[in-house]
Image (spheres, helix red, strand yellow):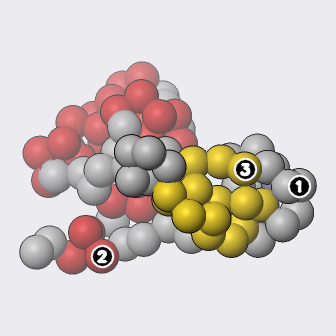
Amino acid sequence: MGMSQTLLAVPRCTACGSPAIVKNGHNACGSERFVCKACGARRVLTPKRQAASPRRREEVLRAVATERLTLRAAERVFGVARQTIAR
Ligand SMILES: [Zn+2]
């Protein structure tokens, strides 16, 4: 629905950060598993971060301004994708 929903991050290896990962089926919960071709790690990707709603975005931006958080930190703290925070 919202345009922010269409922003998709490139999946990366959670161990080394390489984007050179290949799908390797699904686990019992139905989450996709990946194998990293760079370091060989087998990981289940964590669920995608939620896109920030306008209200949430305002809240996060205020926290960024008042707490001097970086957007990366805000993303971690609030569990929203920073791409949806910084326009
Ligand atoms: Zn890796």
Front tag of 1 and 3: 3
Q: Is residue 22 above or below residue 33?
A: below
2 and 3 marks in contact (CB < 8 Å)? no
Name the element at disc 3: strand
| Circle 3 residue | 42
Rendered location of residue 58, percent (x, y): 20, 44
Q: In which quarter of the image is residue 36?
A: bottom right
Q: Can residue 70 be seen in this view?
A: yes
Q: Does the residue labelled 1 lie within 8 Å of ligand 1?
A: yes
- Label whose residue precedes the other's in the sequence (2 or 1): 2
| Circle 1 residue | 39
| Circle 2 residue | 6
Rendered location of residue 86, percent (x, y): 38, 58
Taking depth in this image into account, of 46 and 86 the one nearest to the observer is 46
Taking depth in this image into account, of 29 and 4 the one nearest to the observer is 29
- Residue type pointed to by label 1: Cys
| Outermost residue, top side | 67
Name the element at disc 2: helix
| Outermost residue, right side | 39
Q: Distance between the residues labelled 2 and 1?
A: 29 Å
Taking depth in this image into account, of 32 and 86 the one nearest to the observer is 32
Q: Quadrant of ligand 1?
A: bottom right
Front tag of 2 and 3: 3
Q: In this view, does 16 lie above or below 3?
A: above
Q: Can residue 19 be seen in this view?
A: no
Rendered location of residue 11, percent (x, y): 58, 64
Taking depth in this image into account, of 49 and 75 the one nearest to the observer is 49
Query: Which residue is located at x 18 percent, y 42 percent?
Result: 56
Q: How far apart are marks 1 and 3 (CA)?
A: 9 Å
Rendered location of residue 19, percent (x, y): 72, 68
Name the element at disc 1: loop
Q: How crowded is mark 2: few (under 14 residues within 10 Å), some or many (20 or more)?
A: few
